[in-house]
Amino acid sequence: MISVGVDLGTSTTQLIFSKLTLANTAPAFTVPRMEILHREILYRSAIHLTPLLGTDTLDAEAIAAILTEEYRLAGMRPETVQTGAVVITGETARKENARAVLEAISHLAGEFVVATAGPALESVLAARGAGAESLAKSMGKRLLHLDIGGGTTNLALLDAEGRIVQTGCLNVGGRLVKLNPDGVVTYVSPTLFGLDTPAVGERATPESLAPLLAQLVAALEEAVGLRPATALLRDRITDQTISTQPPVEALSFSGGVAALLDEKEENWLAYGDLGVLLARAIAASRLFTLPHDLGRETIRATVVGAGNYATELSGSTIFHRHAVFPLHDLPVAPLEKENLADGIRQGLALHGYDVPIALALPRQEALDYDGLTRLAETIADGAKGQGREVPLVVVLEQDMAKALGQALATLVPPEKPLICLDGLYTPPGSYLDLAAPVGGGTALPVVIKTLAFV
Amino acid sequence: MDRQELKEMVAQLLLEMDKPQPAKTAGSGDVLPDLTAVDLRGEYLVENPVNGEAFRRLKQKTSARLGLGRAGSRYKTASMLRFRADHAAAQDSVFSLVPPSFAEENGLVAVQTKCRDKEEYLTRPDLGRRFDEPQQAVIREACGKNPRALLVIGDGLSSDAILANAMDCAKAIRQGLKTHGIELGKTLYVQFARVGASDHIGEITGAELVCMLVGERPGLTTSESMSAYITYMPRPGIAESKRTVVSNIHRHGTLALEAGAHIAELMVTMLEKKASGVDLR
Amino acid sequence: MTLKTMLFGRVYGFASVKEVLAKANEEKSGDRLAGIAAEDARERVAAKIVLANLTLRDLRENPAVPYEDDEVTRIIQDDLNERIYASIAGWTVSELREWLLDEATTEADIRRISRGLTAEMAAAVAKLMGNLDLITAAAKIHITAHCNTTIGLPGTLSCRLQPNHTTDDPDGILASLVEGLSFGAGDAVLGLNPVTDSSQRLGEILRRFDEVRNRWEIPTQICVLGHVTTQMESIRQGAPADLIFQSIAGSQKGNEAFGITAALLEEARLQALRDGTATGPNVMYFETGQGSELSSEAHHGADQVTMEARCYGFARHFSPFLVNTVVGFIGPEYLYDAKQVTRAGLEDHFMGKLLGVPMGCDACYTNHMKADQNDIENLATLLTAAGCNYFMGIPHGDDVMLNYQTTGYRETATLRTLFGKTAIAPFQAWLERMGFVENGRLTAKAGDGSVLLGEVRHG
């Protein structure tokens, strides 16, 4: 399966192609279990500066040109790309035409390429792309991953098992102040309000910028829990920060600024922004008193995450009939055990009877055949109001989708499309994209676009 | 003492507080807790480990009996008794019979291979694959002539496996086939069954496809594991490689219902392609 | 050649050497299943009497499977030293038995005579021996072999660390591996039975073993027990393997059921010597077990002890580092209960050593057999007294992947202490260096696998 990842960041735009190898990992003579076994990066683009028209508008044409050229260099065509994600990150997401550009680009990239934005997903992708999950697991520590880019720092908190449990995002980045080669300030991000910022046109020095850097680093220290939280942190939060109870035990870093942590760049103006100085300040800060490590990827962590980790697979014993894939942006309707049929009716009322929605079943107690039949009857009853041609989509975590699907198949009109998937954790408020089955029809590639963590 | 050590000490204390306290006075009404209710994966009995937390995490990834400490170079009493308990369950499951009420209550047609008892069943695999004349007549009567698909439940090496899984799995198979327009006839229950008994049943009835649910040889992890052996045109002497096998059906493996749904679709494919086992690829 | 005897006033006659061999066997359910066992206890003894008076020449000239039909027979016959054979061809089986047990007969004498023995001779003499005879004769013989270290030296008892896992999960395997090492298991080999027999999977596990070995500088061997062809493919792809494993049988037909020929095994051996990671020269690992030929209908009407001996005659052609009988795995239709398993374990170990292969034993049982952990603890103790090279080491004796029970890490440790034995010298030194063993006893650290888990990296 060929996957693409595109990261439209505050300062840079990048793209990767990778090959996701699917394999049945179940022992012989048992039911199949398809998994993404290997993720091999086939092509990494050059790191382009994100083209802007003025300060507030993305240069859609220039971006499209970059992508077209990179597809050509990589020898890829949109038709050959089966999955992937375009993410628009950091300050770029706040540009006026961001949404339009994003959608245009995702169409350019391939049919099942997901267009997405939102700091939560960004944080998850950056942490995964940097390999923070295996790092936390091997350290056995509660680890905070910081992806420090041009505009924002994305936070992903992982438990000792390597699971991402929480995300956050702060306006701390290397490109919030831009300078010309003489050190004259050319841009100051409005997100730096309340800090000791230089004025545009002023000639800055490392010394004159020191108070600002100290404030940015202090905000990170507060986020990690190494200092009590103050307004410094609160004013930097874009949507939320992470909880520091229980305490963070280790750190890992990625992003453009992280790439400078190991480099000894002499010229602080090498990139025409705060990056070099911010990296120096972080290395000298309290952050480095915790066990820490650089990610497997640094500046490319987000794009690698988008290419390699945006797509997951459903369970391998699932049910689907008459469905036309791909299906995009299915809102998840979380259901409770009590009044299941009513919950379904409310979900339909909320999202509409003519659009497919994903009914997310709660965990079931050990079911026998009669219990399964009753569950199927309840679902069919609740979904009665849905249009006959609209696919009934049921998702759950436990491995029982095929049995449930077969039971449902006898209860809903024979021509009604029906999809029943397991092995998926779908947080409330998330949206699903479903691609055509792979692995001989045994599993579906799924992108769960999580907008918030519980 | 650094922060890490302090944390571990606190964790250890909390762990000990959580453990059930032994009863101070064991009167006649007291009951010792069920040894087999403990999830061994969570247990960690090594004293003063160097990196106990890291080992406990690794141990979660395996059902192997690890981190259970020692008494000299021998086993701790608790882990030794747990082993013996699990072995006892396995042995009882092999050597006990599925009660006759199982077939009656579930509307199954009960037959028996040429084996007279468990002893003979265990030492004479050849007899566990064949039926005598009167039993053949029962099978012929129950299944009719040349059925498309037959479902057979055999005790095999685990009566526990059959009692725990067979009926849920069988019902799911029946339903799954029904969605494809295939109606199953009566289900057979075979006592003292080897997998090869399904070949003789194939010969007796002329069935095109036979699916046999059979109890697996129990391990210590579970005594309830069941397999399905599905054979296209099963006749005595057919190569084992011509069977399609779905194993590890139990509450901690593939659930019986989901396995049944999967098996039903496999059976549909086999009838379409007129093949099973290695021929199915 | 006399195939008849009088016993209790009755004449017992046998049609062939093969029938004599079969009926002289101690009782085994497999021989009964094959329909070749003695009718009753008296006929069994009558067969033993006839067998005792057969000469070694009679046995050489009547192999269980004809020379023309079977490459196992051909290899065994062609590998003999004819001069040594000529010197003993006239011995009766009884004379061979008493010579082996004689105090004046040295280990060197036995090793020399071994070069003139066929498998049928080794099987024949085993059938005339009691259990303590088998132990006594076997204890005289030490068969050593060298891969990266030397196995089988006097005073050592080794252990194959078998960290099997239901899904080959790398972390789960690692957990079993490090705990086993901390108990002193693993000097024979770190050897896993994979769930999935693919070259890729084998490569992954071999690399993991290699990492652990290199990380802690452990002097031992590594092996993943896939099919021989899968292992060869894996080595071709660059995987680090010391030993190549294969299950073998005592007839060509039995080997065909395993998908192997002698030529294939030789190709594998040469590949391991050329592209493997071991020092050598012994780079093969074979497993056997009474009854496997019957289960693939490849026994040619011969009994399971004779067919087992032929495995060892075949094995020695490839100068293996490890050979073990998996004695209780096959099930009650071949070995009914603990008594039969014990007997088979002692027979196999003795016959293997007599034929010159470095013998270990997987002293084990399945849950449909009338045996339990006590029985294999007995067998392991008897085999340690008999000088067995190695046992299996599995967490608590419970193999969660193969669903059978065998000896655990603690068994080797206990038997070493009881019999004053150690692991292979460099491995023993490693155990002491790591602090798991001190003065031949387990230390407080032993059994704590976490000692071998990586340190957390601090900035």
Image (tube, coloured by chain):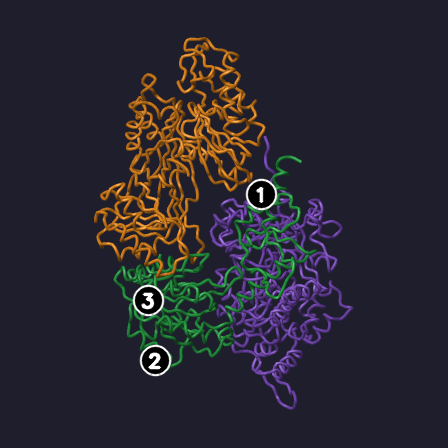
For discs 2 and 3, the disc positioned in front in the rendered view: 2
Vertical placement of A393 versus B177: above or below?
Answer: above
Q: The purple chain is which one?
A: C
Which residue appears at 46% of the width and 38% of the height?
Answer: A165
SS at circle 3: strand
Q: Are marks 1 and 3 on the same chain?
A: no
Residue to which mark 3 is pinned: B209
Q: What residue type is labelled 3?
A: Leu
Q: In which quarter of the image is residue C362?
A: bottom right
Give the quarter of the figure containing the N terminus of chain C.
bottom right
Label 1 sits on residue: C211
Which mark's residue is nearer the viewer, 1 or 3? 3
Query: What is the C-alpha distance between the residues marked 2 and 1?
Result: 62 Å
| Residue C176 visible to the viewer | yes
Q: How far apart are marks 2 and 3 (CA)?
A: 20 Å
Q: Which amino acid does label 2 sit on?
A: Ala
Q: Residue at 43% across / 13% down in the picture? A: A179
Can you see residue C74?
A: no
